[in-house]
Image (cartoon, helix red, strand yellow):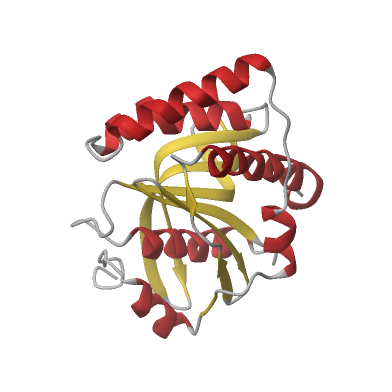
Amino acid sequence: MARQNKIRIWSEAELIDTFALDKLKTPTPLMTEWLNATAQFNEFEQFTLQRIRNEAVQNIEAWAEEDLKMNFIAFVIDLAGLKATKTIRTFYDKTISATVEGIFLKTKTDFMIAKGILDLAKNPYFHFQEYKREKDPHGDPMAQLVEAFLIAQEINKNGKPLYGCCVVRRLWYFVIMEGKNYCVSMTYDCTDEKDLQQIIAILRKFEEILLTRLID
């Protein structure tokens, strides 16, 4: 039992090989729908967008992870409206685990949206991983996102797709996992005005998807 529960740091390639996954670069119908989201911004939102983008242009290369979270990502999440309700909770630095196909998996998500009560996460729907560098010494960000998806599939046991986002400094990737396949979007540069607006539109679209399709 102790050997089964030993924590392993996975690479993306190891997860693909071990769990027979397929990484898709061509957008699936679900990904196309998600990425084609549109959004309107009021005057205050436009002001906030411009302010945080200017901050990122000037400082993002120097920001540590906590700086990036507090000075930029927190405002993006707020503008996207990804907030807790009575039954849907938002979790930061939440550790989740499950035994998947006989293999114990455990990872921490930087930000997670899940059905839950207080600090109890029951059904994960969205995972967000953020890193300052391309490859963090403590793990591969895309691998941790995929591992979180595998754990969520085991927890949820409902066959529904899982949504997520991987941020590496200025670059944002959106990811959807359906069964054994996960689709990764093109990159969005958050220091580009149009890309930043689209990032927020995509995140806002997820709330609609969550409420209409994912919640049991």
- Residue 34: x percent and y percent? 70, 54
- Residue 94: x percent and y percent? 41, 42
Q: Is residue 4 left or right of residue 115?
A: left
Q: How many marks?
A: 0
- Residue 62: x percent and y percent? 22, 36
Q: Nearer the viewer, residue 42 or 77?
A: 42
* Quarter assignment of residue 87: top right
Q: Please name the residue shown 30% across and 66% down the image.
A: 5
* Quarter assignment of residue 177: bottom right
If the image is split into quadrants, where does the N terminus sit? bottom left
- Residue 28: x percent and y percent? 69, 70
User: Is 206 rendered above or below residue 72?
Assistant: below
Q: Nearer the viewer, residue 94 or 59?
A: 59
* Quarter assignment of residue 142: bottom left
Q: Please name the residue shown 49% across and 57% down the image.
A: 187
Q: Nearer the viewer, residue 40 or 165?
A: 40
Q: Nearer the viewer, residue 111 or 101?
A: 111
Residue 83 visible in the picture: no
Q: Is residue 45 left or right of residue 112?
A: right
Residue 201 visible in the picture: yes
Q: Please name the residue shown 71% across and 43% down the image.
A: 205
Residue lying furthest right? 212
User: Is 79 rendered above or below residue 47?
Assistant: below
Residue lying furthest top? 44
Q: Please name the residue shown 71% across and 62% down the image.
A: 32
User: Is 21 rendered above or below residue 100?
Assistant: below
